[in-house]
Image (cartoon, helix red, strand yellow):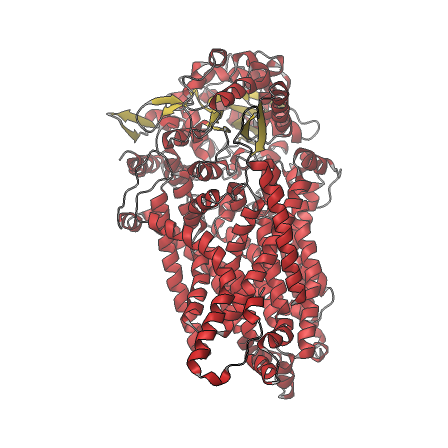
Amino acid sequence: MTATVTRPAPPRRSRGRRRRISRQTRELWLLMLPAMVPVLLFSVGPLLYGVGLAFTDARNTRNHETSFVGLENFAELLSAEDFWSSFKIGAIWAVSVTVLQFLAALGLALLLNERLWFRGLARVLAVVPWAMPPVVIGLMWKLVYHPDAGILNDLLGTDINWLADFSLALPAIIVVGVWTGMPQTTVVLLAGLQGIGKELYEAGEVDGAGRWRRFWNITLPQLRPVIVAITSLDFVWNINQFGLVYVLTQGGPGGQTRLPMLFAYEEAFRYRMAGYASMLGLTMAIVVLAVLGLYLWRQMRETK
Amino acid sequence: MRRADSSPVGIRVLQYVALAAFIVFLAFPLLWLLSTALKTPRELALTDPTWIPDNPTLANFSDAFGEQDLVGAAARSLVVALFSSVITVLVSLPAAYAMARYRSLVNRVAIGWVLVSQVFPFILIIIPLFMILRDIGLINTLPGLVAVHVTFTLPFALWMLQGYVRAVPRELEEAAAVDGATRLRSIASVVAPLLMPGVVATLLFAFISSWNEFMFALVILQDPGVMTLPLTLVRFTGPEGVARLGPLAAASLMATIPSLIFFAIIQRRLKSGLMAGAVKG
Amino acid sequence: MRIKSALAAAAIVALAAACGSGGGGGDSSSSSGNEPVKLDFLSLAWQKESVAANKQIVDEWNKANPNIQVTYVQGSWDNVNDQLVTQFAGGTAPDVIHNDSPALAGFASDGYLLDLKDKLPAELKSDIPQAAWDTVTFDDGKGAQGVYGVPFLQESQVIIANKKLLDASGVRVPTPDQPWTWDEFSAAAKKMTKGGTYGVAWAMKSPVNKTLNLALNFGGTFFQTSGGKTTVKVGPEEREVLQRIHDQLYKDKSADPGALGQGTADPLPAFYDGKFAMLPAGVYLRQQVAEQAPEGFEWVTLPGPTGTSAQQGAVSQTLSISQDSEHVDEAMKFIAFFLNGANQAKLAKGDWLLPTSQKAADDPAMTTKENGWDVATASAKNLVVAPFLKVKGFDEWKTKVATPVLQQYFGNKITIDDAAAKLVEDGNEVLERYQR
């Protein structure tokens, strides 16, 4: 697929810097092109349209004249109490799921990278949550949390209605969130671990570094780009998650699990407030980008 | 290899216990699905659930297969997932290489885009996207769904792959170039083997995302003749979240297993890719 | 590299092949001359018998009408509205659409559904009572009223009871002619509460529709319209049922608090276990009980309790025609056939709901004592259109205001006065959005 790019070009090293830069740029564009076409057509295009909607009073109906309203949706959003409570729930959810997911996945990836018995089997079983369609995940966990026929109460000997309890519902879905996203994180970290050159460890061993020292001084720094990437993406995915709560709690009890995207989804698809929902999506996206920007900037500075 | 043997027994035991705990946590629903799929409606309504059904039945499977075209749907899902994943990797690999190895404005815009595209929720996109697909005649077709799946797994695939490319020391490539190899040769012989685990992980990611994807499939596919597996699964649910658990579990099992088999096959590649890299590196 | 380019080549070839086969099915709508008209029918049937009945009726139609071929497309209740919002916006929705009356109000005022007022065949129109037609008559978004679907299956609230516990308590067994009053119902529940067994269980995960439909027992409408403006009202009539359920939970302690957060079908395992005696539920839940109840478990269907009247709010399942359909007349013919008396009886039986067709209601299958069909079918006469169906913004009020408030109230976290105040104040704010 890179045939055009990589056709053996006569070496031009002697021709000076400018030429090389322009050739590089051309190469770069060619390499990027196949990826850019679908992205521009099916992603950037619709997105710009969606962003545009955020500044209108558009509704998903036929009987409505859409007009430009500027920042009115934004003002309405800021004054909406239910948005803020949803925002808070979303922040708790995204941060805790991402952190727990990362810690658990790192532990699992390290284990799967050891030469243990049944490692192959364990690797396959570890991706079970990922292999399950989300529809099934929701129903599965509903069964687990079922107050009477659920296996959780049966195992713990408790009699708790997990998903309907005002203080337990959010933690309960956080567990499901961690469970759902763990395999992805694990696979990525595992591939990252395997990319670390053996010679680094061998050198470490020669220096007499212990298990912990090797982990801190070799594994973590080597893994850093992958860790930064996957935690950022996990965070973004988690904040955009709504399928799970949609199936499990529909935002209840009493709005305790109404994640921001469930909120936006309801606005767009149930109340047809397309403009307002777009503004909600846009606002969340900007907040997330700011958080991520800060995180990535700090990570980059520390690396340097 | 040597470091494995040097582990003290205590740590080994601890590792096995931890591994077992992880596996139980992650994999028990598979067993539970199997158990549910074999139960009669009566047993499913017991307050004291059991792991092993008292009167195992295959009725759920025959219901699931009899009422829905599960085999056809699975075949279509497989085609869509294979194409989506292979195309995603083919398209994103050169771009990922460019992102990791060149420094320029385009490159930074691309990295920025990867992030931004993930940040924006599908609510912003789905209706305009639907209209574009309609206008170019891709509604109700599997290629249309493949195009969408490629578009939406692409950013993450890019990010994954560029991370793996970065992890390949640039010096290796440069050394090969100094040896007189062309750029292409140096990429093929040095970078590619080291990238294999990453490519495989990306393929896996793209395959499974596509296999499981629901929302886009729901709005894009309308004819019964083109529907994919996740769409047929929800057919066993009624209003207010009431569901026919037995057939649903049976069908879900059928939907889960192919991904696992795919993973089982591919994880071997993961290992041999690593070995190849280690030997050459 | 070689492997990759081979893969790429294979991918292109196969994709082209898939394009060919995938695209072939869809675009035969531009009929030239004698080609049959093609209709897409989105059905939401999900019970085994009901799926079978749907498919069978479509097959019969296709055999009898070679010129109007119907494609049976199965959807799901879980996400039909998301699917429709998108497909309507893109102008590619199916011709004939199965849904329910609460969803129709929105789609009707959005302008996506065809007004069937002048298209209904006389026979179909007269077979279905006016009360049912009321559940599908909505504002078209421009001030006029239209009929946006044909109602065919209705749900009413009954009480499913454990026969042994009911008999043991010695209370009078209610009949459709002589149902319990709410006082009798509460007294019976109290009597059946003993030794770890509760009298009743209220599954209140989605409390709004259930409470609002029952509130009509005491004339509670929850909404009032004056001067073209709709507002929320929670007066004495509305409070009756709320307070009575709350009393069962916290005063009489005759209602199982464990069931509160559960969805409609979730309390069933505990019901079979004898943890409580009565489960107020929609008629369709009988199907699950009949299928799941352990051997030897005897159960009966009791009519719902009455207040100042026996009225309940009705919600119907419906068939509608998309505004964008190119074959409106053919679609209407198909609906008329699909919903004739004989077919409605089959569909009702398959989904364990009540047919709107009066011919179907006389079908022996609908009046048998077995599985409580007689009681269920008799309850149809109490169904009136639920006032909330006509309220623009009801859905948002329900999700954002009423669901959390009622959950908190039934969870005994707030008083009825707080609940009423919130329902009204926050509620009016929501409705305001729709009346601009």
* Image quarter hosting the N terminus of chain C: bottom right
* Residue A28 x/y as whole percent: 48, 70
Q: Image check: B269 left or right of C99?
A: right
Q: Is residue B107 above or below residue C140?
A: below
Quadrant (top left, top right, bottom left, bottom right) of the C terminus of chain C: top left
Residue lying at the far bottom of the rendered structure: A207
| Residue positioned 27% across, 45% down in the render | A68
- Residue A154 in view (yes/no): no
Query: Quick check: B256 above or below C110?
Result: below
Residue at x-position 67% and y-position 41%: B72
- Splitting the image into 4 quarters, where does residue C401 fall? top left
Residue sitting nearer the eye, A60 or C398: A60
- Seen as rendered, the residue at the extreme left is C227
Residue nearer the viewer, A238 or B227: B227
Q: Position of residue C5 (x, y in %)?
A: 64, 63
Relative to A197, say whether A76 is above or below. above
- The residue positioned 74% from the left and 67% from the top of the image is A117
Q: Position of residue C369 (x, y in %)?
A: 62, 15
In this view of the protein, can residue B1 be seen by the observer?
A: yes
In the drawing, does residue A251 fall left or right of residue B39?
A: left
